Structures are given as C-alpha cells and as structure tokens.
Image: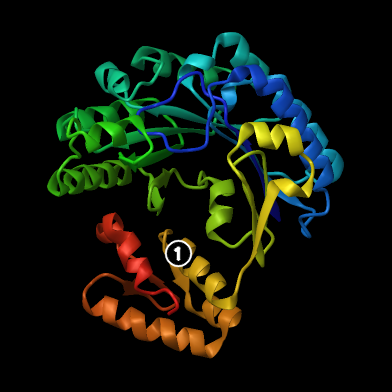
Amino acid sequence: MAGIYTHIPFCKSVCGYCDFFRSTDLSRSSAYVEALKAELTANGEFLSDRQIKTVYFGGGTPSTLPPKTYTELIEQMAGIYDLSEVEEITLEANPDDLSSEYLKALADSPINRLSIGIQSLHDDELQFMNRRHDAATAIKVIKEAQCLGFDNISIDLIYGLPCSTTERWKENLKQALSLNIQHISAYHLGIEPRTRFGTLASKGKLKPVDEATSQEQYITLRETLLAHGFEHYEISNFALPERHSRHNSSYWNDTQYLGLGAGAHSYDGHSRRWVAGNLGRYIALCPSTEIYTREELSEDERYDEYIMTRLRTAKGVNIEELQKKFGARKLQYFSQRAEVLKARNMLKSDAEHTFIPPEKYLISDSIICDLFAE
C-alpha cells in the first residue's frame, strides 16, 4: 500500500521557529487548490501501487482552507487510486481555525485523524513562539472534536524553550495527558538560520537552552508518557497502542508515496522527485513536468536512506531485511560499523534488530551518519 501527502503552505502568521515552506498570501489559495487538482490528475500513474493506505494534508496550516477543499481532493484521489481500504486520513490544524462549524464540517468529511499544533499549554510560551491561539482555545477545541466523534487526535508539543523551565514542561505534559489524546509529537525547539529565532540568535538576543536542560526535559518527556501507556515508537513520536501515525510510519518503512504541492516530495521506491517551494512558479507551471526535480538513487544512497529512516524508529534496522535489500557485503559493512558503536553504547541489538537506545536519541543524527556508506 502507498500514501499520498498534500502540502498546503498557507499560514495566517509565521511562528518564530518555522523554516518550512509557507506563505501568508492567502489570496492565492484558490489558484493553488486548482493547481493541486491539476497535478493530481497528471500524476495518476506515478505510484505503481494503486492501493492507498494513508492520506495526509500537511503544511503550512491546512486548516486555513475550508473543509470542502479536502473532501473534493479526497474524492478526486478516489477516482484515480484505490482508496477502498484507506486506513488514515489526517489533517493538520491550528486550534484558532477550528471553530465549531469547521469541526462539524470535518466530522462529516472523510478525515478521521486530526494533528493539532498545540505546541504549549502556557499562554506566555505560545506568545513567545508567535502562536495565534491561547491554551484555553486549544483545550476547548480538543474536547469539542472528541464530542464530535474524533477518537484519533495527535498534538504537537515543543520543549527546550529558552523562556521555560523543566517544571513548566512537566505541567504541559500533565495537561496534555488530561485531554485523553492518542498521539503526541514532541520536538526540541530548533533555531534555524532563516527564521525569526535564527535572526535573534545571530544578534545575541536569543540563547538556546543548555545541553543538560535539553536532556532533563527529554527524559521527563519519555518517562512521563511511558508511565501513561504511550509507546515511544519514533524519535519524536509517542502513541497509545495501535495509534501510531500510519502515514508517517510509511516514510520510515520504505513505502511509496506521492507528494502534491509546492515543496512536496515523492518517492517511488527507486527515485525521489520534488517541487521547489515557490508558490507563484507552482501555480503558473502546474501540471507541467517543469515543476519537478528528479533524482535516481544509487544503491549507496538507497542504503543511506534505509539506515537513516529505520534508525529513527524504536525497532531499528532489521538485519535480515537489510541483507535482502542490499546484499551480504552491505550487511558486513553495517555490522562492522555497528560493532564499534555498540562498544560505545551508542547502539544495541536483539536477535533481529539493531537500534539506537532511547537515551541516545538526542545525538541520533551523529550515530546514523557513522553508519552511512563511504
């Protein structure tokens, strides 16, 4: 089974930490949706696997567009691919967009999973990040969505905030858990160059939290959620049993997916294709193939992708699968490198898998790089 991702770049305002492709020019949203529909029609043959398992609307802020937009796109997808066994259709949303009317319309649509950008349940932290909603709105929206029948809700939270403390992070987690949600994606604040936070940091006006605080808040996150029945199934993701994000898991399991929209990526098992994050160019040229950049992956690149994605998960690399995909020589190469890392307690193994121990997740990028092909 395959997945379809659709990028909706529109935002009413820009958060201080965001470096995703986005646009605050909502006046072009109608033209963008028409371009999406044209791209979808023109790419009917991209996926060799016609059975779609998951659909994901991400951004940006998809909830800036009306629910009927997503119903129309899903109906169009169903006319091109087989959605008869689709398991999960997710919409990312901001709390301030989710009015009672909006939620009711979503409840009547094919969307069955919400991913809500809460980020914090403290108002001063939300203001620091330039979020538009307050904590009371976030809580109200989640409860209302649950009353309407949504029983698969994920929220995003951010830790490592310079304006916060570990005690306040504990309060965030306690409040989040009281909402009886099924999934939490928790990210350490990143300060990227082309963001407002990046600009402030370059001027010495914003200082990242120290390593000890990062570690303390990560441990708090993990211990708290595990104690409440959540599974830590991927570096940044926690879920109750059977509530893992099926769409995001497909990225980590080498599943084909079609990406639609400016800034979106696609993968067919052997090559990657992506569209530049340029709204005007996308609208003007879509559905021409001029919008795409394509890259055929070499065996070493496919191996690196496999290592990178699998080691983000709790299960890690399946040794038998690695040999089947890449042969005995690559397995030997991986095993030799892994032994060095295991001796330093950076990796662990069981009978079938090699994986990064959770206490090393904060330095996972450097561990993964040590296993890449030379």
Q: Residue at x 25, y 18 (%)?
A: 124
Residue visible at 52% across and 58% down in the picture = 252
Q: Nearer the viewer, residue 44 or 30?
A: 30
Q: Is residue 108 above or below residue 52?
A: above
Q: How many marks?
A: 1
Q: Nearer the viewer, residue 40 or 360?
A: 40
Pinpoint residue 151: horizontal percent, then vertical percent. 54, 30
In the rendered image, which quarter contains the N terminus? bottom right
Name the amino acid type tagged 1: Met
**x and y percentages locating residue 152 in the rendered image:** 54, 34
Residue labelled with disc 1 = 308
Q: Would residue 108 be visible to someone looking at this image?
A: no
Q: Is residue 109 above or below residue 156?
A: above
Q: Quadrant of residue 2?
A: bottom right
The outermost residue toward the right is 79
Say if residue 212 shows up in the picture: yes
- The answer to whether 162 appears left or right of 45 in the picture is left
Instruction: Name the quadrant containing residue 188.
Output: top left
**Within-10-Å neighbours for mark 1: few <14, some 14–19, many 20+:** many
Secondary structure type for disc 1: helix
Taking the image as shown, residue 153 lies to the left or right of residue 56, namely left
Q: Nearer the viewer, residue 145 or 273?
A: 273
Q: Position of residue 4 (x, y in %)?
A: 68, 45
